[in-house]
Image (tube, helix red, strand yellow):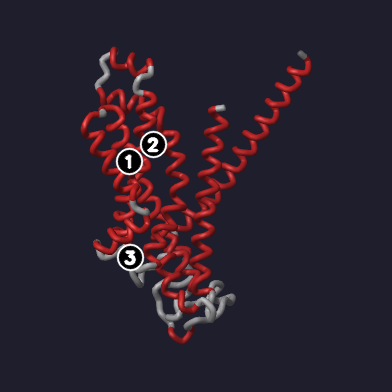
Amino acid sequence: MRRNAGSSAAAGIARKRKKNHTKLRLIIFGILVLALLFTAVFAEHICPYDPNRQDLANALQAPSLAHPFGTDRYGRDMLSRVIAGSQTSIFSALALVAIISVGGTVIGVSCGYFGGIPDTVVMRISDICLAFPGLVFAMAIAAVLNGGVRNAVLALAVVSWPKYSRIARSQTLAVRQAEYISAARLAGDSPFQVIFRHILPNILGPVLVTAMLDIGTMMMEIAGLSFLGLGAQPPTAEWGSMMSGGRSMLQTYPWVVLTPGLAIFVSVALFNLLGDTVRDSMDSGNA
């Protein structure tokens, strides 16, 4: 009995330490992501130079005190371009994740709760979307729409919503026969009241975690479309487009490519770490 009590106490201490460690990570990564968002929101005020101002006399200057990230082929300050590009790159990814998570969840919950022919049709459409490689399908749609950031976001939204609809549908199917759902129906709640009061609050966890983990992925996919010329168009500062414009100078003037690449790496890493931490926090809370 004493041994079992000691094992239970040790397990409880280990769980508490893990929970505290997860909270600490959540605070640290949350602060870093907030700092990144702060930079994006106030980019116009933080940039040391006008990101679009050309100065051919200072073209392709190596990193220095005056230009910590160097300059590009048009003499534009790379640090200012990277900071300004955060607005397009980060906010486009956040908007895309918001669109596909909300839209996919609404579709999935509706299909899972009401079922019938609409459910079958929508799921077959999602099967078609999932049958193609996502980025290749998005490239085709973006090319038809003639590029641009908005069209790149729209193209990725068309191919990315099925994941959320399937998650929401499966979660809805799992809870719609629960006793509290039956009690809500007996109490006279309409289907929409049941969905918004009882189903959505109980299925949002997996959707929110998936959305958090998707921010970095969508940021890379938007940058990929821009790199291929199907996203942001010059002179708009966007990290993928900036890498594309300087790819021919990688060996001679590497900072032109590496600085926006580093910005993508740091941003994606921070959002992924925050998403992993949020998932761990929810798992520990459910344990």
Image coords of residue 210 (percent x, y): 44, 42
Image coords of residue 171 (percent x, y): 39, 30
Closer to the eye: label 1 or 2: 2
Image coords of residue 152 (percent x, y): 32, 59
Please name the amino acid that badge 1 sits on: Gly
Image coords of residue 263 (percent x, y): 51, 62
Q: Is residue 212 left or right of residue 2?
A: left
Indicate the secondary structure of the residue bearing disc 2: helix
From what the image shows, is residue 100 above or below residue 110? below
- State the separation of the CA atoms marked 3 and 1: 24 Å
**Crowdedness of circle 2 by 10 Å Cα count: few (<14), some, many (20+)?**
some
Tell me if label 2 and label 3 are in contact, CB under 8 Å.
no
Please name the amino acid that badge 2 sits on: Ile
Please name the amino acid that badge 3 sits on: Leu
From what the image shows, is residue 137 above or below residue 1? below
Residue where numbered disc 3 is placed: 230
Residue at x 56% of width, y 79% of height: 62
Residue 229 visible within the image: yes
Quadrant containing the C terminus is top right
Q: Quadrant of residue 27?
A: top right
From what the image shows, is residue 89 above or below residue 212? below
- State the separation of the CA atoms marked 1 and 2: 9 Å
Residue where numbered disc 1 is placed: 104
Marked residue nearer the N-terminal end (3 or 1) = 1
**Crowdedness of circle 1 by 10 Å Cα count: few (<14), some, many (20+)?**
many
Residue sitting nearer the eye, 97 or 108: 108
Marked residue nearer the N-terminal end (1 or 2) = 1
| Count of marks, rendered view | 3
Q: Quadrant of residue 240?
A: bottom left
